[in-house]
Image (cartoon, rainbow, N blue to C red):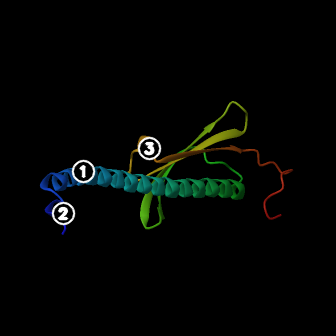
Amino acid sequence: MISRRSCGFTLVEVMVALAIVALSVPALLFTLDQHIDGTGHLRDKSMASLVAGNKLAEVRLLAASRRQLLQGSETGTADMAGREWFWWLESEQTQVPQFFRIEVRVGLREGQPEAALISRVAYLSADFSDNMVAPGA
């Protein structure tokens, strides 16, 4: 014959198990929420990096075809991955003659370059003398 004591859980055991579940579920949900936010942020930074790389490539191509570098600043938008990205481009001369520092910042909010997700810097020469071989020549 089985004793009554071994047939199930006591009320105290059930309450302790419920307390453990009640404390662990919110902590797991909080961790999951942080993980999802982090993944979205990394996705946005990756896409912003692609937009910045595309813009720098465009600047290089335009400089080679026009034989003149962009000077000053420029802003604009680019569509990628179904979103609109805002970019800010700054070109400034370095201490080396005919050598420019070009910085591209990319973000999701218009008019806020200080809140950019990513910033890329390139250095380009403005020397387009005839002794340089043009791409494709």
**Circle 2 SS class:** loop
Q: CA distance from mark 3 to mark 1?
A: 47 Å
Q: CA distance from mark 2 to mark 1?
A: 19 Å
User: What label does residue 113 carry, if any?
Assistant: 3
Along the polypeptide, which appears first: circle 2 or circle 1? Answer: 2
Q: Nearer the viewer, residue 55 or 137?
A: 55
Of marks 2 and 1, the one in the foreground: 2
Along the polypeptide, which appears first: circle 2 or circle 3? Answer: 2
Of marks 2 and 3, the one in the foreground: 2
Q: Nearer the viewer, residue 109 or 125?
A: 109
Residue 87: x, y in percent?
Answer: 48, 51
**Circle 1 SS class:** helix
Quarter of the picture holding the C terminus = bottom right
Identity, as a three-letter code, of the amino acid under mark 2: Gly
User: What label does residue 20 carry, if any?
Assistant: 1
User: Quick check: 33 left or right of 54?
Assistant: left
Local crowd size for mark 1, using a 10 Å CA cut-off: few (<14), some (14–19), many (≥20) = few
Identity, as a three-letter code, of the amino acid under mark 1: Ile
Residues at circles 2 and 1 in contact by the CB criterion of under 8 Å:
no
Identity, as a three-letter code, of the amino acid under mark 3: Pro
At x 84%, y 56%, the residue is 133
Residue under pointer 2: 8
